Image (cartoon, helix red, strand yellow):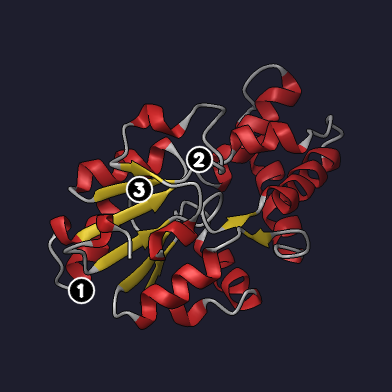
């Protein structure tokens, strides 16, 4: 096991950009939602830079890009409802696990670590995705961006998970790919581990000052 795991009991994982590459399916859903409103459809590269703050912000960023100005409430509501509908129809068609993710989760769970999933994705999409990849059994707790009153970069979901299992923050590790994951982990008092291959608005994740950066989750169990 990686030295960063020494003294840890609970490991919190982000989902999009950390365990799965979901941008292809998110792009399809965003494109359909904008096309429904007769707006220009974005590329996957655009969507990749918009992911990280939850579905509502993703749609708002897409609309602002297509319009050249922030959308009004009526248009946003229509597009957001469209996005949720289209994404629910096919959340796993093009999404893939990152190399090393499944092995890392399985090995860590078997080693006795408490694994929790903390994502800004709406909670309704978590179970279908985990079921698709046969990963549901890996996690003791799953929290979406709408599960609690606040989402990352707030430390609330992380502190909620630690308290739920009676684990001190100093015994917890936050694993993610974006500055929001690192900021939430630091604010919660967790050790932070970053992965450089995900979605971080075009910025190197090292700029967020994580405790460590690994190229693959496989390194966590090496």
Q: Earlier in the sequence, mark 1 or mark 3?
A: 1
Separation of disc 2 and disc 1 at Cα? Answer: 29 Å
Secondary element at tag 1: loop
Q: Residue at x 50, y 47 (%)?
A: 215
Residue pointed to by mark 1: 165
Q: Residues within 10 Å of mark 2 (few under 14, many from 20)?
A: some
Neighbour tally class for label 1: few under 14, some 14-19, many 20 plus, Cα within 10 Å: few
Q: Secondary structure at mark 2?
A: loop
Instruction: Choose top left, top right, bottom left or bottom right for residue 130.
Output: bottom right
Residue pictured at 70% horizontal, 49% vertical: 26
- The x, y position of residue 147, in whole percent, is 40, 61
Q: Position of residue 212 (x, y in %)?
A: 33, 43
Q: Is residue 152 visible?
A: no
Q: CA distance from mark 1 to mark 3?
A: 21 Å
Which residue is found at the position 60% from the left and 60% from the top?
99
Give the number of callouts: 3
Identify residue for label 3. 193
**Position in image of residue 208 (x %, y %):** 36, 31
Q: Is residue 191 above or below residue 37?
A: below
């Amino acid at each position: 096991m990686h030295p960063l795991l020494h003294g840890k009991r609970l490991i919190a994982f982000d989902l999009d950009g950390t365990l799965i590459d979901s941008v292809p399916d998110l792009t399809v859903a965003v494109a359909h939602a904008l096309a429904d409103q007769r707006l220009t459809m974005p590329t996957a590269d655009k969507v990749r830079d918009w992911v990280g703050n939850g579905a509502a912000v993703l749609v708002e960023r897409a609309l602002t890009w297509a319009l050249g100005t922030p959308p009004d409430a009526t248009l946003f509501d229509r597009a957001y409802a469209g996005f949720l509908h289209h994404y629910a129809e096919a959340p796993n068609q093009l999404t893939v696990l990152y190399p090393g993710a499944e092995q890392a989760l399985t090995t860590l769970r078997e080693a006795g670590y408490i694994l929790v999933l903390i994502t800004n994705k709406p909670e309704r999409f978590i179970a279908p995705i985990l079921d698709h990849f046969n990963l549901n059994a890996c996690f003791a707790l799953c929290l979406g961006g709408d599960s609690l009153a606040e989402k990352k970069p707030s430390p609330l979901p992380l502190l909620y998970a630690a308290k739920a299992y009676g684990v001190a923050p100093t015994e917890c590790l936050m694993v993610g790919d974006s500055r929001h994951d690192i900021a939430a982990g630091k604010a919660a008092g967790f050790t932070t581990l970053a992965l450089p291959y995900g979605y971080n608005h075009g910025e190197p994740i090292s700029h967020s000052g994580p405790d460590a950066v690994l190229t693959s989750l496989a390194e966590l169990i090496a």
